[in-house]
Amino acid sequence: MKLVEAKAVDNLLYEELPLKYFYGRNLDTAVKNQEAIRERVAQIPAVDAVPVKHGRWVNSTTCSQCGWQMIDDVLESPNYVAFNYCPNCGAKMDGERRESDEH
């Protein structure tokens, strides 16, 4: 899914697209089509979204965003699989590992 800014769509409809793109051979039809599209866009429900935080595991145990650390019991478990997100802050662990993080 891709989230878009509603004002950007409105800007596209009114400022960037020539009226000829609204299927009208005359100005009245084009303006009506443009208004109809604008009304439909305004009716699309908004989603509750937050920006994605990106982080990385420092020394394979510590979240670079919030400092949360995995406990030894988790790391030593035979079923341990590295998280692709931080269970504490939700940061997506897709950042690059840095040599300076290894102590």
Image (cartoon, rainbow, N blue to C red):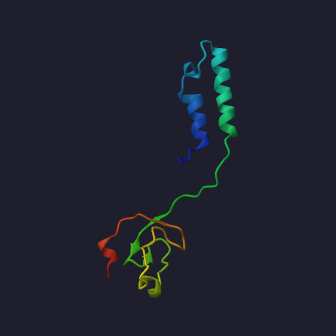
Q: Residue at x 41, y 63 (%)?
A: 94
Dividing the picture into quadrants, the one containing residue 19 is: top right
Name the quadrant containing residue 49. Answer: bottom right
Question: Does residue 31 lie above or below 103 as drawn?
Answer: above
* Vertical arrangement, residue 42 with respect to residue 58, above or below: above
| Residue 89 picture location, percent across and down | 54, 71
The quarter of the picture where the C terminus appears is bottom left
Quadrant in the rendering for residue 12: top right
In the displayed orientation, state which residue is furthest to the front: 78
| Residue at 29% over, 73% down | 99
Task: Specify the farthest residue to the top.
Answer: 26
85, 56: nearer the viewer: 85
- Residue sitting nearer the eye, 83 or 38: 83
User: How many numbered marks, from 0 up?
Assistant: 0
Residue 91 placement, left or right of 36 = left
The residue located at (39%, 75%) in the rendering is 58
Q: Position of residue 100 (x, y in %)?
A: 31, 75
Furthest residue in direction left, as rendered: 99
Residue 51: x and y, percent? 54, 58
